[in-house]
Image (cartoon, rainbow, N blue to C red):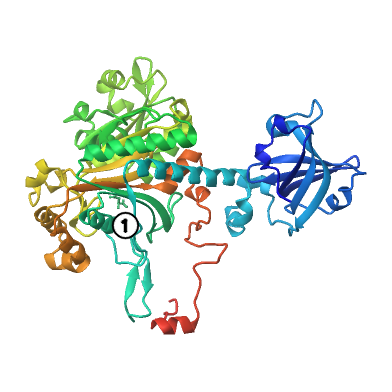
Amino acid sequence: MRRTCYIGELNEAFVGRTVTLQGWASRRRDLGGLIFLELRDRSGTVQVEVEPNAPAFAEADTVRAEDVLEVEGRFQPRPEGQRKGGLADYEVIASRVTVLSRAKTPPFELDKGEGVAEEIRLKYRYLDLRRPEMQRHLRLRSRAMAAVTAFLDAAGFVQVETPMLTRSTPEGARDFLVPSRLNPGEFYALPQSPQLFKQLLMIAGVDRYYQFARCFRDEDLRADRQPDFTQLDMEMSFVTQDDVLDVQERLLAHVFREVLGEALPLPFPRLSYREAMDRYGSDKPDLRFDLSFVDVTDLFRGGEFKAFADAETVKVLAAPELTRKQIDELERVAKHNGAKGLAWLRREGAGVGGGISRFVSEQAAELIERTGVAPGGTLLFAAGEWKRAVTALGAVRLALRDLFHLAAAGPRFHVSWVVDFPQLEFDEESGGWTYMHHPFTAPHPEDLPLFGTDRQGEIRAQAYDLVLNGYEVGGGSIRIHDPEVQAKMFAAIGLSEQEAREKFGFFLEALAYGTPPHGGIAWGFDRLIMVMSGATSIREVIAFPKNNRGADLMAGAPSPVSPAQLAELGISVQAEA
Ligand code: ASP
C-alpha cells in the first residue's frame, strides 16, 4: 500500500479523510487503555491514537521505539485544549497498524539529540540522522547544491570532474597517499583541491568550470575541519578580480534567497587584509557587530610607559564594564593567542582607574575621547609587534562577542570580502619566504618590482577570501598566466627551476601553450552549510563525518589491513615504537 503523503504534508485539507502513513515509532505511551504512538518520517511527526476496541490494538500493543510502521486511520483535529500548533493540532485515529520491521532498543534516545555523547551519535549515525534536525541539515545542503547548480548552469559554467587518484597539489597541507599496486613503490596523492586541474581546464578552453569537489588534507582536526571535505570549486577565463567577485556575490545571494529566503545586501563590503587585521585582528572578521580597535601608538611614543613607548603598535578595544574575573579570563585568551599579557584600565568618571591607569594618567583624556569608552567601561590594550598584537586583541574581541552576545544584535548573516592578501609570508620555522595562498596566485601588477627586494613582504596578491559571520567560507585568486612572473614567484619562495619542474612540470609545460588570463575561487561548502543552518560544527552537516581524531566510528575506519593486501602492495608496516 502506498502512503497518502509525507507526514509533514498533512494539513487541514486532510481532516476527515482516511490516510496511510509510513515511518518510525518515535514514542509510545499507554494512557487510560489507549495507546498513543508518535509516528515520524523525514518530514514530521504526528500522533496516532489506537483505541482499545480497534482491530489495530493488538498489533499496536507490540510496538516499541523505532519500529517501522504503516498506519492507516482517520485524520482529525485533536480535542480542543490539546492543540499545540502545527501538526500537533491533529491526530490519526488508527484503523490498522502494521509493523513492517522491528527495531532493537536504540543505544540512545533520539529526542535527546544534542545532549547525547557525540561518539555514540557518530557510531550509530543512521539513527542520529533520523532526528528532525539532522534531516533538516541534509535537505538544506541538498537544496543549496541544487541552487548552485541552477545558477551556474544558467551562467554558462560547465561541470567537470577531476581525478581523485592524482599527484600532490600545492595547498600547503599533508597529502593522503594511496599506494599503487601496479607500480610498486609508487603512490598517488588524493587531491588537496582540484587547483591544477581547474587551471588546466582553462588552458583547455573550457572558460567557465565548476565542481562539487571532494578534497583531502591530512591536518590536525578542529571543530570546523574534516580530513575529507567538499569544496564548491570554480574557475573562469578572461576575467579580472572584479568579474570573479561579481559572479560570486550574485551566486551566494541566489543561494541564500532560494534556500533561506534571506536577502543578502549587494555588493558585499570589501576590506583589505591590512585593514581587517588592523581594525579587527583577523583576516576573517566577524562583522555582525562593529567593535573595532583604536590605534593609540602615537599617544605613547617616546613616553614614560616603556611597555607601550617602544612598541611597534598599541591598539585598544573599548569593552563594557568587566569584572576582575572576566578580565583574567580575557587575559588568558590574549596569552593563548600570542600576547604576553592584557593591559587594561577602567573609565571612572572623567578619569581612569585600575590596571595600568597610573602609568597612563597623562593620556587618560585622549584615550577616553578616541575610544568613546562609557563610564565604568573597560579599555583593553595590546602592544608589541603589529601582527602579534592585533591577532591577540582580535581573539579578545571574539571572546567579548561570546561573553556579551554582541553578534545577536546584528544581522543574522554578514558577508564580506577580504582582499589584497600578502603574496608572500615569512616562515620563521624554515627562515624563508613562502606563498600565502598558493604558488600560482598572481601578484598585483604594480607590486611586481618588489620581487627579490627587501620589500617582498609588501607584495599584494590578487587573492580574496569570502567571509561569513567570522568564518572563511571561500578563498581564491587571479592566477599567474605569464611564465616569467611564475618564475619570479618560484624564485621568491626558494624553489629552484628544477624543483619546480619535478613538482609541477606537467602544469608548467601546459602554461607555455597559450594560457588565458584566469582566476577562480573555492567555497568550503561544509562550512557554508554549517553557518547557514546555524550548526556549530561541520560534523552536523556532513552525513558521515569523522570524529576529531579522523576516525569514522561507525564504519571503523581507518583500520588495519590484511598481510596479503600489504604484500600485494609491497608494503610492510613498522611496529609502533
Ligand atoms: N584551490 C584553492 C583552495 O583550495 C581555491 C582557489 O584558489 O580557487 O583554497
Q: Is mark 1 within 8 Å of ligand 1?
A: yes
Amino acid carrying label 1: it is Pro
Is any atom of residue 342 visible in this view?
A: no
Q: Is residue 466 above or below residue 226?
A: above
User: Residue 36 sits in which quadrant?
Assistant: top right
* Residue at the extreme top of the image, as rendered: 350
User: Residue 196 sits in which quadrant?
Assistant: bottom left
Q: Is residue 161 above or below residue 380?
A: below
501 vs 254, nearest the viewer: 254
Provide residue 304's location: percent of width, then percent of height: 21, 30
Provide residue 48's location: percent of width, then percent of height: 79, 41
Taking the image as shown, residue 350 lies to the left or right of residue 514, namely right
Provide residue 574's location: percent of width, then percent of height: 41, 80
Task: Name the residue located 22 percent from the left edge and 60 percent from the top edge.
Answer: 430
- Which secondary structure, mark 1? loop
162 vs 217, nearest the viewer: 162
Q: Which residue is mark 1?
A: 194
Task: Name the residue located 30 percent from the left edge and 46 percent from the top edge.
Answer: 521
Taking the image as shown, residue 455 lies to the left or right of residue 118, namely left
Q: How many marks?
A: 1
Task: Name the residue located 67 percent from the left edge and 42 percent from the top edge.
Answer: 5
* Residue at the extreme front of the image, as rendered: 1
Provide residue 229's location: percent of width, then percent of height: 42, 55
Task: Name the residue located 47 percent from the left edge and 33 percent from the top edge.
Answer: 403
